[in-house]
Amino acid sequence: MKELMGRGVSTGIAIGKVYFFNNSLLDLPDYEIDDIEAELERYHEGVELAKARLEKIYDNAKERVTKKESVIFKTHMMILEDSKFVNLVETAIKKKKNAEVAVYNASTKIANMFRQLNDDYFRERCNDIIDASHILLQILQQKDEVNESIGDDEPVIVAAIDLLPSDTMSFKKSNLLGFVTNDGSQNSHTAIIARTMGLPSVIQIHEPLAGYNGKQAIIDGQLGKVIIEPDRNTMALYNAKRERYLKQQQRLKRQIGLPSETKNKQYIRLTADIGSIDDIEKAKENDAEGIGLFRSDMLFMSREKSPDETEQIETYKTILKAFGDKGVVINTVNGGSGKGMDYLDIPHEKNPALGFKGIRISLENPEFLRTQLRALYKASVYGKLSIVLPMISSMEEIDYVKREIEKIKDELRLQGVPYSDDVKLGVMIETPAAALISDDICEVVDFIIISTDNLIQYTLAMDRENQKLVDFYRPYHPAIRRLIKIAVDNAHKYNKKVSICGELASDTAVTKVLLLAKADELIMTPSKILKVKAAVREIDTSDGYKNNTTKFKF
């Protein structure tokens, strides 16, 4: 028996044989061509065949995952048509490089440009480029599609150096028990697809996996553990653990419709944190009591120009209508270097987290801010809207936005355009500066949202995605507790609503502490809501900090 440790990205237990999937592109042919026109024609024919294959994968994905995940493959088709990519390939072919090498070099060059950007979103775009070119290279080499017969005799655990989204979607779900890879990240498309499909997955295993092909194995997605050739006792232990996990999932489903209140009847509102209107159904399926935070950035990213007022209105209108009186909180653009908002003249920065982002972008681009605020107010008649301002660090920033809002409301009244006069304005508490002046902030706004992920990152001066800092990253650090307490107490002093978002909001080890702190709302990804609700309903806050399992308390 051997244990391999990695990082769990999709929970659950899988038990079965390992199938090592080799999707590498080694031994690419590299030669000088004689007929440039014929090679260009071969390349363009390959692109059309690759797009047809991607269309097939897209149709398959629509039946198995959400629209948000399936649209990845439409993006891949666009990559193959991208002028920069096409120009790089055609230029190389005209220099007598064969199509395979030209495609490989072009995709590698563009992917490396994205990889150098200090931003998770764009680092993941590297995989989109690699995936699209990978399929094109398979076509050019006349290789077959991924073999759907994998696991025909019995479902298998698929192991690989890495899995591209097209690989993941090309397998039949009935053939799959889970995924194990050497590479990958928490927010990769493959990890997201695995979670959507409910398949346990572990990434970042630092040992070659090919040698375990055909061996019996166990995936523990929660602990990030893979056990090769488990002994009898371990098998018995994990069979029982899997049964408990399945029963727990059924128990969570039974939470739907129940109130999120403790045994002693203390209520806390549980809402969803989403980034796209495609997440609306996921929020509803998990019994979200509203949208605690709709991150509007996705509407503005990776495009040549900002969405106009009409497009923004339609997006805001859709989400507001979906939740009606339950309420939707929408942030003004956060943005930052590497977010594909070049139309705002955002400079490339070595450390975007400390740079030109959040309210700073809006203040430097007043008409851009006014357009978003106008769209939000015009859409406000379709539901219960609140607006939250990100990365606030001074009162002057809030005052400026409030003045702009009053101007916009005056304009809309004069034009006879209907809007709700009950739109609430709030602030994200993301930095120590905002926490320390939260008394002033709470005096002039309607609510605050404490963004724990950013507050921890900025207080401890640690990038939460930096693997080198895992042992140093302390979300329960005393400084974090004190800053949260300051912000919560100040909100209560002015009778303002205080919400918590970020990882701490869904960390059931501190749910009781947040209840005792009198937080009004916890905002989290939809998939975490039922688990937190179940935890809330098992808590009795009348005994104070008794049975608190962490040192995190106020």
Image (tube, helix red, strand yellow):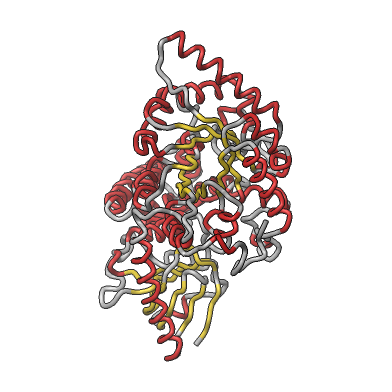
Q: Nearer the viewer, residue 430 or 209?
A: 430
Q: Is residue 388 above or below residue 402?
A: below
Asked whether residue 314 appears in the rendered view, the answer is: yes
On-image quarter of the C terminus: bottom right
Q: How many marks?
A: 0
In the displayed image of the protein, which residue is found farthest to the top? 414
**Residue 388 position (above or below residue 539):** above
Q: Position of residue 78 (x, y in %)?
A: 40, 40
For residue 1, above or below residue 482? below
Residue 168 point in image, percent of width and height: 38, 60
Instruction: Return the residue found at the far bottom.
Output: 232
Q: Is residue 117 left or right of residue 188?
A: right
- At which x and y percent is residue 47? 36, 45
User: Which image quarter: residue 399?
Assistant: top right
Depicted 523 relative to depicted 532: above or below: above
Q: Is residue 39 visible in this depiction of the protein? A: no
Q: Is residue 424 left or right of residue 12?
A: right
Viewer-proximal residue among 515 and 87: 515
Please name the residue shown 47% across and 64% down the image.
Answer: 538
Q: Residue at x 52, y 32 (%)?
A: 387
**Residue 353: horizontal and vertical position, in percent?**
66, 43
At x 72%, y 37%, the residue is: 437
